Image (cartoon, coloured by chain):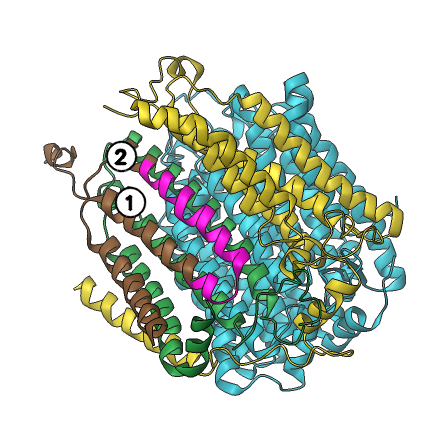
Chain colours: A green, B brown, C cyan, D yellow
Amino acid sequence: MHSFDQVFTQYQDIVTTGVYGSAIGLIIIGLYAVLLKKNLTKIVIGLSIIDAGIHLLFVAIGYIQGGTAPIFSPGHEGEIQKMVDPVPQALVLTAIVIGFAVTAVALSLVIRLYKHHNTSNIDQIKSLKW
Amino acid sequence: MMALIAFSLMAIVLVAAAIYAVLQKDLLYAVISTGVISVVLSVFFFLMQAPDVALTEAAIGIALTTIIFIITIRNTTRYEDDPKDNTLEKF
Amino acid sequence: MVISPVHYIAVPLLAAFTMPLIAKVSKELARVIPGLVMMYLSFVSVVLMQQVIQSGPISEVIAGWQAPWGINLMFTPFSGFLATLMSFMGLLIWLYSFNFKKVDFSQSLKYQTLQMMMVTGATGIVLTGDIFNLFVFLEITAITAYSLTAFYRERDGAEAAFKYLLIGSFASVFVLLAIMLLYTQLGTLNMAEIAQKIQAGELSGTMKTTIFALFLIGFGIEAEMFPLNAWAPDAYSQAPGPIGAAFASIVVKAGVYALIRITFTLFDIQGAHMYLIIAGLVTMVIAEVSAVAQTNLKRMLAYSSIGQMGFVLIAFGIGTKEAVFGAIFLMFNHAIIKGLLFMTGSYLTFNDTNKQISSLRGFGKKLPLVSLLFAIGAFAIVGLPPFSGFWSKLYVLTAAGSKEMIMLILIILGVSVVEIIYYFRVVGKLYFSKEENDIEVQKPSINAMIPMVILGLVIVAVGIYPDLVTGFFERATDMLLDKAHYIEVVLTQNVVN
Amino acid sequence: MKKVFVLILLAVVGLYLSNTFNLISFGDNRVGEVVEETTTVSGYYLKETPTKSEVANVVTAIVVNYRGFDTLGEVTVLFLATTGLGSILFRRKEEEEGVERLSKPASSLVSTGSRILFPLVVLLGVYVFIHGHLTPGGGFQGGAIIATGFLLMLISYKNYKVSHSTLGWVESFAGISFVLIGFWGLISSHSFLQNIPQVGELNSLISGGVIPIIYIAVGFKVAAELTGVLDILLNIKPKK
């Protein structure tokens, strides 16, 4: 486990591009799916990929080099100095559960649309105009 | 050194799983790769000293999100442009 | 039990959690609870507004932690006025939807819970003093709006709800990104402390504009600015009758409030006001023009509501004291008049599945009172003298005049003419065209008629004697424009109650 | 044509995001010195949690106590998602009977395995949300784990029925207890969700005053709601 901390401190730039790059990559791929794909389920998959990217970014901004998890386990009471920022973690907890709730409602709408129109292709369902 | 290779491998798997999830026509495999994304994400959170979030992502991201997607696929089409989709008969 | 702003959120939550239990005992009682809650909240609003007028804004601290560390609720004259408006409208909408024919009995428990929680979510957005809490309440309002839009089986509510959900998820992605960036730069989530730190210049140029742009897009979707309101016409027209009224009078207000709180209190970017004017102008012109082309009554009202929101944005964009006063008056008027129009409109087109305006021929005789109230609403929204809409339009036009924005005045007057065209076309159909097809008409029940009559009376009363309410707007304007007072109230006082 | 436009848009968004996030260097210490008068909010939390509110897990203290209103909103979002799901996928009573959840019975391996695993998974879930304030984990995580336990049973047994009334009772009681704790705080020490002064010291099970009780209520509520969501979704009559 500590070998990863060592990696995070030594190869700082590789890790930065790795984390931020993959998070932004996830958001871009999710956006691609939502904007271009026709199948309703695939669009909801795109939405959950964008959510995954956002949550990764949220935790990444809270990470501090060489920091430990913000838990005062027995015997480590004094180590306030080397702790990771706890606030983004608390916010991500809420954001993940909200993302799940919205995904559940979206999928129930997809199911009802399929039962009603017998197709899950968004072009066939577009009966509402601008 | 090994840890660096493992870390960058995971980042590549993350993006590859996302691309696979979007391009795959068979929705079941696409949903499974969203599960893979959640697994790698949970490991990343653990590495970034966020155990609470790793546990949440594991419990909700991997288990529950994947299962509600699979239930949706069961009630709608399994393949993206499903041949037995009735849209063709209309024309 | 000391009355405090937290009751706006805690009491409806308690009611929402107990309703399934009470429904096991008696379904009838379970449907009455939202009404009792709304009545209690209206009473709380009256009490708190008195307190605010005497002793200034109330900042209530949650969980005992002082402002920047804990979450605080801000009951200022501006947010208090909006919370009061939302509670009263929530009460009227509950009364209107009590035994709404189309909501069949077994579903009405879920319907009432979702409707009450939508009002609570909007009130939460208005009251909270913490950005991430604002995001959570935005999600509460959004998730109730998705489920309620898709409530009816036979209409294509599910498409409208899915479209709304897609665009709503974009809104929450943008807001989350903005909160994330803001936290990295300033290290705090409390709105007052953010305003203080931005004023002290702790946020650099490019990052500040990026965060402001992300917030603007995120809340612009909720406040129906032009490029982002593709969801609104479908959501309004497919949702059940009372929900359309709730969208127009409550949910959109919360979106506009969040937008105004970002531009006026948090960020002081010069271009912001000009941007608001341009965005509002574009929204208004396009919405009003497409309203004329509508044959479906509810879609026409939806476009007119978006146009009015554009008008509110213009008024806030002008930014002078009188313009902001006019804007707040406009928000008050829009909530009441648009609520009345949606309520009466849904009874006028009750039995017509695709809500055609042409089917309203000669309804003046069949539904005399409902048509009269619709006419009052139409005259008021257009801004004719004896009604309240006139005053708010007058204030905004004079404010624009004092800033020599002649082009703006011309466009606003032009748009008013467009409004007159399509509203009088409907009123004309109601009264002056003879009825030929005998669509049997749905007589509204007593409890649906009461809120419509109350709203009609309020419009006429405020129209004739506007000083009834302008006192509140004065204080609200001063509070909104006075950023230092907002920061000082939140950050310096100790745990108050 | 639309594809090209979208690809350009994606490139612009990607570039914009990447150079915005270039300004934020990964891993540098934004929390600042955690000393007596810290400026940042997280520094305050790190200093206050072990001393004043006697909770080992700082994230739990933030989620439940410092920002308890977020969690209240959070639990409402899940409650409304369940209600909304129920109203969207509502089916008249007569359509309901004869809903065949599984066409073929699960294999003996799955059914015996899940019968053994189910109590263990629920035990793990309960452990996670009872020790929310000591070890990583808490109400949301514990509730989700319990929901996966029920999911296991729902999948492997055709006639396994999760009774909606018990779910309803558990959900309502947990929600009501959460709000009542909030009101009790408002009455006793004039601020909603106020934490009572400390009983028990750091890292013991009974520590942190009201925080573990709230998180246990959240755990029950999240477990009941997620099981409800899964039950509604699993009982939809698949279209043949």
Label 2 secondary element: loop
Amino acid beneath label 1? Leu
**In this rendering, would C253 be left or right of D230?**
right
Mark 1 → mark 2, Cα distance in angstroms: 10 Å
Amino acid beneath label 2? Thr
Residue placed at 64% from the left, 72% from the top? C188
**Direction front: furthest residue:** A75
In this view of the protein, which residue sits in the foreground, D1 or C346?
D1
- Residue carrying label 1: A40
Which quadrant is home to the C terminus of chain D?
Answer: top left
Query: Is B47 in the magenta?
Result: yes
Mainly helix, strand or loop, the magenta region? helix
Query: Is B60 in the magenta?
Result: yes
Residue placed at 62% from the left, 59% from the top? D59
**Residues at discs 1 and 2 in contact (Cβ within 8 Å):** yes
- Residue carrying label 2: B76
Residue A129 locus on image (x, y percent): 31, 47
Magenta segment: B44-70
In this view of the protein, which residue sits in the foreground, B72 or D166?
D166
Q: Chain of mark 1?
A: A
Q: How many marks?
A: 2
